[in-house]
């Protein structure tokens, strides 16, 4: 244990005195996972810095109190029941990302395309007979890092790929936080509050991103001035990781005090029947998020205090289809992921505010480059080009694509031809993905891909079934199709005439965990 952490660890009695409660109350809070603590043998141990951050988060100045945070300590590798590699022994739970809203680290940033940490944990409970440090977990579509965090917390090596700069930033901050200097992080929270208090009348030095455009002003004038002050403070940080933490905190709450909202795609608040945000306590909102991050980092570091060093974690900011050669062949034990669905949800356009306001991109041309290299591209990218040929054979798929291509031809690119190009591009990328994944999976390695059915121009595509067929053609064994969600939300898809066309009946959207073995 490092000297810094050793001096920070305190007993139950010391923690109770510090928090100003009885030892009995402190023990009950720890047992209920309501305070950051860890049981070592028969005794409770706490990090003084974690309790400081916890207290600060519960009582931030000027913030409306939120419900108590439930600290659910994650599953640890020593509790795993060894099983023979092959079919996973644990039943899969609900994949909904909303289950993460009270989970340390996972709660930092909402992500519409994410899945629950408990789902990932249920897969990793079937860890092989290897020592935790000898297990490598890969997420080719890492998003905001759910799979990577769960792997690292269990002592596994983690590898992720993410093409979206904002999501990649969040993932990187999460997996690197076991190595952060907690004292500097706490000082950052303190200094930020002082800085914002001193800027009540001053003009900000930062400017809005020049190439970011929106139909209505993204921020109201008073809110924008405060956001620019936050960016001023970030610019004064000399250490890159501190700037990254600030950007994650700001990005997490950015839309909440803007004139836009997710419905689930990003649109104006007025279009959703909501009032614009004319004023907001930006400083307190960001400070509360920073306090939450500091508290969670302290909690995680307490769990790692007895280890010589945290597990290895790598995040590649590029497409897995282009960068999979960074992963050694036959080296991955678990691949757990959820690729973009065949629903044209535009992850890049829906994070444009974050990309520009956090300084992750400066020019709109960078967005075009990301669209071209994204999995499946997007309907907007391929709809007006020549007919895209299908590179694979899949029972029933060519016939469905022909039917789709013949729908609503009088509508030009908005008809079936454009959507068929999008679908073909998507399934061709499924083939590229499965080929790449098969190269890097260890023999007997487990693959779990969460994917759902989709609707294009009124035609239901059972994307999960087609994906499983493609995987089998690439050498994977289909183990089981787990229907993890019988219904999933897809308002923008179900109600869109562009996607639904002239569908005669309602189709329920579901979600499947496709389980494969290498």
Image: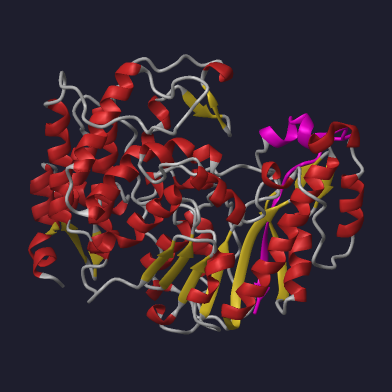
Q: Quadrant of the C terminus?
A: bottom right
The range drawn in magenta is 491-518
Image side of residue 16 versus residue 316, left or right: left
Q: Residue at x 48, y 71 (%)?
A: 137
Q: Residue at x 56, y 46 (%)?
A: 368
Q: Residue at x 58, y 18 (%)?
A: 271
Q: Nearer the viewer, residue 182 or 30?
A: 182
The image quarter in which residue 440 lies: bottom right
The image quarter in which residue 487 lies: top right
**Chosen colour scheme:** secondary structure
> Residue 298 location, x and y as percent?
22, 55
Image side of residue 488 versus residue 120, left or right: right
> Residue 5 location, x and y as percent?
13, 64
In the rendered image, is residue 504 in sight? no
Magenta stretch: residue 337 in it? no
Magenta stretch: residue 510 in it? yes
Image side of residue 216 versus residue 49, left or right: right
Q: Nearer the viewer, residue 70 or 191?
A: 191
Q: Nearer the viewer, residue 111 or 87?
A: 111
Q: Is residue 348 above or below residue 171?
A: above
> Residue 9 location, x and y as percent?
13, 61
Q: Is residue 118 above or below residue 518?
A: above
Task: Count all numbered tags in the image, as a single digit.
Answer: 0
In the rendered image, is residue 221 in sight? yes
Q: Quadrant of the N terminus?
A: bottom left
> Residue 256 location, x and y as percent?
41, 28
């Amino acid at each position: 244990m490092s000297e810094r952490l050793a001096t920070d660890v305190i007993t139950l009695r010391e923690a109770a005195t510090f928090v100003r409660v009885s030892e009995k109350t402190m023990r009950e809070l720890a047992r209920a996972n309501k305070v950051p603590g860890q049981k070592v043998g028969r005794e409770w141990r706490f990090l003084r810095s974690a309790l400081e951050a916890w207290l600060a988060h519960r009582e931030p100045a000027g913030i409306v109190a939120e419900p108590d945070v439930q600290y659910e300590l994650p599953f640890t590798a020593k509790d795993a029941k060894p099983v023979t590699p092959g079919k996973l022994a644990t039943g899969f739970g609900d994949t909904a990302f909303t289950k993460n809203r009270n989970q340390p680290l996972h709660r930092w940033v909402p992500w519409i395309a994410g899945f629950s940490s408990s789902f990932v944990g249920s897969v990793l409970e079937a860890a092989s007979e290897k020592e935790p440090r000898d297990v490598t977990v890969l997420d080719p579509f890492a998003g905001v890092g759910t799979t990577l965090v769960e792997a690292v917390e269990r002592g596994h090596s983690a590898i992720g790929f993410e093409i979206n700069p904002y999501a990649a930033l969040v993932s990187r901050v999460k997996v690197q936080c076991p190595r952060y200097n907690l004292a500097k992080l706490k000082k950052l929270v303190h200094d930020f509050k002082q800085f914002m208090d001193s800027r009540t009348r001053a003009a900000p030095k930062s400017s809005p991103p020049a190439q970011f455009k929106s139909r209505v002003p993204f921020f109201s004038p008073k809110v924008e001035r405060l956001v620019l002050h936050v960016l001023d403070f970030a610019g004064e940080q000399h250490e890159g990781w501190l700037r990254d933490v600030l950007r994650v905190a700001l990005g997490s709450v950015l839309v909440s005090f803007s004139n836009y909202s997710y419905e689930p795609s990003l649109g104006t608040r007025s279009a959703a029947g909501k009032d614009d945000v004319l004023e907001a306590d930006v400083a307190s909102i960001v400070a509360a998020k920073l306090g939450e991050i500091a508290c969670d980092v302290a909690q995680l570091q307490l769990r790692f205090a007895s280890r010589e060093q945290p597990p290895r974690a790598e995040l590649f900011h590029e497409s897995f289809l282009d960068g999979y050669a960074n992963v050694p062949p036959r080296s991955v034990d678990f691949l757990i992921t959820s690729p973009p669905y065949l629903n044209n949800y535009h992850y890049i356009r829906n994070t444009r505010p974050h990309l520009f306001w956090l300084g992750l991109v400066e020019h709109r041309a960078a967005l075009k480059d990301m669209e071209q290299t994204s999995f499946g591209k997007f309907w907007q990218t391929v709809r007006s080009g020549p007919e895209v040929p299908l590179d694979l054979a899949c029972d029933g798929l060519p016939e469905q694509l022909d039917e789709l291509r013949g729908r609503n031809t009088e509508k030009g690119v908005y008809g079936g031809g454009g959507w068929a190009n999008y679908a073909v591009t998507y399934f061709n990328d499924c083939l590229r993905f499965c080929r790449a994944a098969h190269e890097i999976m260890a023999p007997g390695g487990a693959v779990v891909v969460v994917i759902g059915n989709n609707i294009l121009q009124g035609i239901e595509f059972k994307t999960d079934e087609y994906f499983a067929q493609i995987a089998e053609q690439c050498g994977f064994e289909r183990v089981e199709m787990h229907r993890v969600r019988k219904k999933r939300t897809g308002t923008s898809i179900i109600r869109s005439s562009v996607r639904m066309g002239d569908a005669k009946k309602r189709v329920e959207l579901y979600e499947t965990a496709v389980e494969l073995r290498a």
